[in-house]
Amino acid sequence: MVKNWAIAIGINQYDFLQPLRFAQRDAELMQKFLQGEAGFEQIFFFSDNSPDINGKSTQFLSLCGSIIEASKHLILLLNL
């Protein structure tokens, strides 16, 4: 059976760039769409204040490898 997973990233506050206003909101809306209408099994959400996943930090790069290995189809939304 095919597993459809996605990663939604919405960062509003960057260290060295002008802040964004709607990146987090857009990623949240995409997460809801993929989970509801598109039927994705797992959507990982990363934002300025996203919670830990299974007790692990949501630092994006530390999780990328394991997420990609576990899924067959992956959609990556980068809202920069």
Image (cartoon, helix red, strand yellow):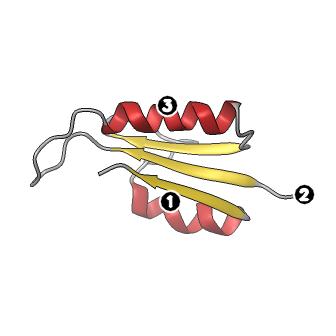
Q: Residue 6, percent across and down?
A: 60, 51
Asked if 20 appears above or below 17 in the picture, the reply is above
Asked if 31 appears above or below 61 in the picture, the reply is above
Residue at the image position 73 percent from the left and 43 percent from the top? 41
Q: Secondary structure at mark 2?
A: loop
Please give left or right for residue 77 compared with residue 21 in the image. right
Please name the residue that numbered disc 2 is placed on: 1
| Type of the residue with mark 3 | Leu
Q: Nearer the viewer, mark 1 or mark 3?
A: 3
Could you classify mark 3 by the number of other residues whose Cα lies within 10 Å: few (under 14), some (14-19), or many (20 or more)? Answer: few
Q: Secondary structure at mark 3?
A: helix
Could you classify mark 2 by the number of other residues whose Cα lies within 10 Å: few (under 14), some (14-19), or many (20 or more)? Answer: few
Label 3, label 2: how far apart the Cα atoms are: 26 Å
Could you classify mark 1 by the number of other residues whose Cα lies within 10 Å: few (under 14), some (14-19), or many (20 or more)? Answer: some
Residue at the image position 41 percent from the left and 56 percent from the top? 60
Please name the residue that numbered disc 3 is placed on: 29
Q: Residue 63, percent across and down?
A: 50, 59
Asked if 62 appears above or below 36 in the picture, the reply is below
Residue at the image position 40 percent from the left and 35 percent from the top? 26
Q: Quadrant of residue 67?
A: bottom right
Please name the residue that numbered disc 1 is placed on: 63
Give whichever of discs 1 and 2 has the lower sequence position: 2
Label 1, label 2: how far apart the Cα atoms are: 23 Å
Q: Quadrant of residue 32?
A: top right
| Type of the residue with mark 2 | Met
Q: Nearer the viewer, mark 3 or mark 2?
A: 3
53 or 42, nearer to the observer: 42
Quadrant in the picture for the N terminus: bottom right
